[in-house]
Amino acid sequence: MDSASQPDTPPGEPPSIFSNLLGIVIALMTLTLPMAAIAHFSSSQGLPPPGSAPPSSGLGR
């Protein structure tokens, strides 16, 4: 078999603009949504809201 020969089937049509845009949107969402979710759910986890003091037991007085 000659490796330099042309393939039997012609190459398909190039992808349309719509499929290119869809791929770009999916790629950007894949990269940004996990970071946005981590930033949203990890912000101020375990920290008391500002201005609120922890309840005192009153035993120190």
Image (spheres, rainbow, N blue to C red):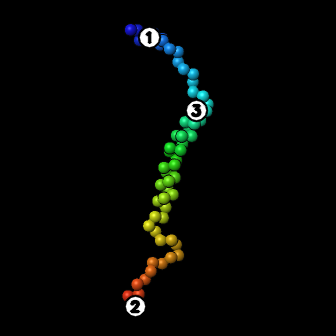
Report the Cα–Cα distance between label 3 and label 1: 31 Å
What residue is disc 2 on? 61
Q: Secondary structure at mark 2?
A: loop
Between marks 2 and 3 in the image, the one whose residue lies nearer the viewer: 3
The N terminus - image quarter: top left
Pointers 2 and 1 in contact (CB under 8 A)?
Answer: no
Q: Which residue: 50% across, 76% down?
A: 52
Q: Amino acid at mark 3?
A: Ser
The tag earlier along the polypeptide, 2 or 3, is: 3
Q: Which residue: 47% across, 59% down?
A: 42
Q: Position of residue 39 (x, y in %)?
A: 50, 56
54 above or below 44? Answer: below
Q: Secondary structure at mark 1?
A: loop
Callout 3 environment at 10 Å: few (<14), some (14 to 19), or many (20+)? few
Report the Cα–Cα distance between label 2 and label 3: 71 Å
Q: Amino acid at mark 1?
A: Ala
The tag earlier along the polypeptide, 2 or 1, is: 1
Q: Nearer the viewer, residue 16 or 44?
A: 16
What residue is disc 3 on? 19
* Residue 17 badge: none
Q: Secondary structure at mark 3?
A: helix
Q: How many marks?
A: 3
Quarter location, residue 17: top right
Between marks 3 and 1 in the image, the one whose residue lies nearer the viewer: 3
Callout 1 environment at 10 Å: few (<14), some (14 to 19), or many (20+)? few
* Residue 4 badge: 1
Q: Amino acid at mark 2?
A: Arg
